[in-house]
């Protein structure tokens, strides 16, 4: 099934908002299996305000991948929508190259398992043909909305 | 090493990794919650890793029983069809 | 090996908090990873960058204005530092644990 989500549809799925919404577009997805999402790094993001470095913070790159994984989970399991997806744990993630403004990061996410309200995802991030990060396992849980 | 004790040691490694302990720190009957301070998410993580490693599906209801390494082994053996 | 303790606070003026989330403000767990990176750089006196996140566990959310305390164990490694960090929330309960490798540079 072809899936293409623009920023408006992403906003409808994720509770994150500017400047913390770190996925720009979903270009392909197979619910329950995999998803490809784009995040363009911009020099106008708050992390560069007054900063002395030019590398995109690793935490934000991991968060961006995590949001792509949350989107995959939410389109795979619409009943989870409406709650707050919370990052619970990550294991064995490698940052292999540094990312900077102007880079277009492509996250390739696989949904590994969903058990008892917890989702496990893995995958990698690329800039062009180059792998910049590899994620062995990310775990998220949904905190139901009150 | 017999196949069952090999699997038991493999399980011990998985449990140790999730609980962030050394394998020798995980006793056969050590209670995950009381002795190693595990929360329910760690139990889910152990279950997830087992399902992936042995391509077996274990119902979530079994989570309550998986309180120590020996109990985990018994549950997995039942669903994976391991013979004693 | 060095043990360091550092006090921090979730700065309510942090621009990212407005979007995380509009209805309830939660300090993004991943920010703790970047906080650890900054703390390691400050302690070792030179820039470092995360290369291998061995494990991160976010156990309890930190809210806007919450004070928190880092306990860092920094061990020199081949290309940088092995770091074992525990973050305690305002009630003294562990809010997050991070085990990671930071390379120099």
Image (tube, rainbow, N blue to C red):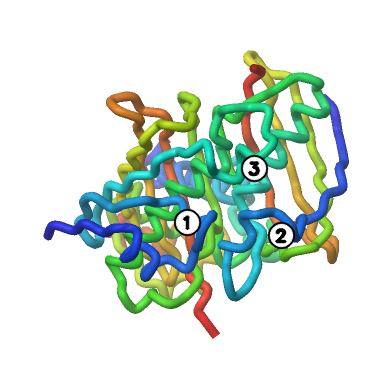
Q: Nearer the viewer, mark 1 or mark 2?
A: 1
Circle 2 chain:
B
Residue C4 location, x and y as percent? 86, 36
The vertical placement of A45 against C81, above or below, is: below
Residue A21: mark in rendering:
1
Q: Which residue is mark 3?
A: C33
Return the chain for callout 3: C
The residue positioned farthest toward the left in the image shown: A1
Q: Secondary structure at mark 2?
A: helix
User: Which quadrant is the C terminus of chain A positioned in?
Assistant: bottom right
Q: Which mark is residue B35?
A: 2
The residue mark sitting in front, 2 or 3, is 3
- Residue name at image x 49 percent, y 41 percent: A61
Q: Chain of mark 1?
A: A
Q: Are marks 2 and 3 in contact (CB under 8 Å)?
A: no
Taking the view exactly as shown, the residue that stands out farthest to the bottom is A146
Q: Give how far apart the Cα atoms at labels 1 and 2 are.
A: 39 Å
């Amino acid at each position: 099934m072809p899936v293409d989500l623009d920023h408006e549809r992403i906003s409808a799925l994720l509770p994150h908002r500017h400047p913390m919404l770190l996925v720009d577009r979903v270009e392909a997805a197979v619910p329950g299996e995999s998803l490809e999402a784009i995040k363009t790094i911009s020099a106008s993001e708050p992390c560069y305000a007054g900063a002395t470095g030019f590398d995109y913070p690793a935490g934000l790159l991991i968060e961006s991948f995590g949001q792509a994984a949350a989107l995959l989970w939410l389109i795979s399991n619409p009943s989870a929508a409406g709650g707050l997806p919370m990052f619970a744990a990550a294991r064995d993630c490698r940052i292999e190259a540094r990312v900077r403004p102007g880079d277009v990061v492509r996250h390739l996410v696989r949904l590994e398992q969903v058990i008892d309200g917890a989702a496990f995802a893995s995958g990698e991030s690329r800039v062009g043909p180059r792998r910049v990060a590899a994620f062995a396992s990310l775990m998220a849980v949904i905190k139901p909305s009150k | 090493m017999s196949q069952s004790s090999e699997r038991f040691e493999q399980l011990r490694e998985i449990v140790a990794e999730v609980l962030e302990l050394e394998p020798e720190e995980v006793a056969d009957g050590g209670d995950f919650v009381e002795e190693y301070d595990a929360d329910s998410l760690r139990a889910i993580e152990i279950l997830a890793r087992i399902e992936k490693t042995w391509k077996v599906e274990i119902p979530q209801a079994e989570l309550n029983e998986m309180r120590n390494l020996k109990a985990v082994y018994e549950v997995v053996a039942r669903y994976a069809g391991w013979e004693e | 090996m060095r043990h360091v303790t550092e006090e921090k606070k979730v700065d309510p003026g942090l621009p990212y908090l407005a979007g995380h989330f509009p209805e309830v403000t939660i300090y993004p767990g991943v920010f703790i990873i970047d906080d650890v990176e900054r703390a390691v750089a400050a302690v070792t006196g030179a820039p470092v960058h995360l290369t291998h996140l061995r494990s991160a566990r976010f156990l309890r959310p930190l809210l806007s204005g919450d004070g928190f305390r880092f306990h860092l164990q920094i061990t020199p490694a081949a290309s940088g530092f092995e770091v074992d960090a525990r973050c305690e929330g305002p009630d003294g309960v562990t809010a997050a644990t991070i085990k990671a490798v930071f390379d120099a540079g």
